[in-house]
Amino acid sequence: MRLSFVGALLGASLVVGALVGRSSSEPAYGQAIDSPTRASNGELFTHVTAIEGQPLTVTVIDSRQRVMAVYHVDRNSGEITPKSVRNISWDLQMIEYNSGKPLPQDIRNGLKR
């Protein structure tokens, strides 16, 4: 688990390094920043969300370990603050959560008739 956290932090650092090298005349949002990327080994996926006036939000997903980490990156100092790390294995096994009506089970039952 420690190794996956280090890998996630490394992935976030690479994304932040790429963003810091961008010209300051570019807007704080755009296609190049707000698009998901995947590491060459296919295990780490990253997504950077840039909202003007807010810190960058970097999401790193380790698909092999099924772990998701979220970081905030200060635009001025480049300081990275971990906000959340979660093993999503159990989340992915849920059938439904926070669903409105009709529930998936109601739809299934209606189709069986």
Image (cartoon, helix red, strand yellow):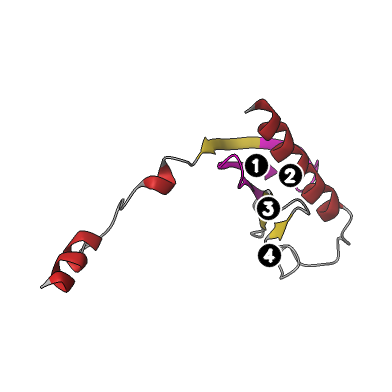
Q: Secondary structure at mark 4?
A: loop
Amino acid type, label 2:
Ala
Task: First in sequence, mark 1 or 2: give its number.
Answer: 2
Amino acid type, label 4:
Ser
**What is the crowding at mark 2: few (fewer than 14 residues within 10 Å), some, or many (at least 20)?**
many
Q: Find the distance from the CA under tag 2 to the CA under tag 4.
A: 14 Å
Task: Give yes or no for contact between labels 1 and 2 (Cβ–Cβ under 8 Å).
Answer: yes
Of circles 3 and 1, which is in front?
3
The part of the chain drawn in magenta is 55-81
Residue 46 badge: 3
Q: Nearer the viewer, residue 109 or 26?
A: 109
Task: First in sequence, mark 2 or 4: give its number.
Answer: 2
Q: Nearer the viewer, residue 106 or 83?
A: 106
Residue 12 badge: 2
The residue most toward the left is: 113
Count of residue discs:
4
Amino acid type, label 3:
Thr
**What is the crowding at mark 3: few (fewer than 14 residues within 10 Å), some, or many (at least 20)?**
many
Task: First in sequence, mark 3 or 1: give its number.
Answer: 3
* Residue displayed at 72% across by 56% down: 38
Q: Position of residue 7 (x, y in %)?
A: 73, 37
Looking at the image, residue 43 lies above or below residue 82: below
* Residue displayed at 35% across by 47% down: 94
The residue most toward the front is: 112
Q: Nearer the viewer, residue 39 or 102?
A: 39
Of circles 1 and 2, which is in front?
2
Is residue 10 visible in this depiction of the protein?
yes
Tag 4 residue: 35
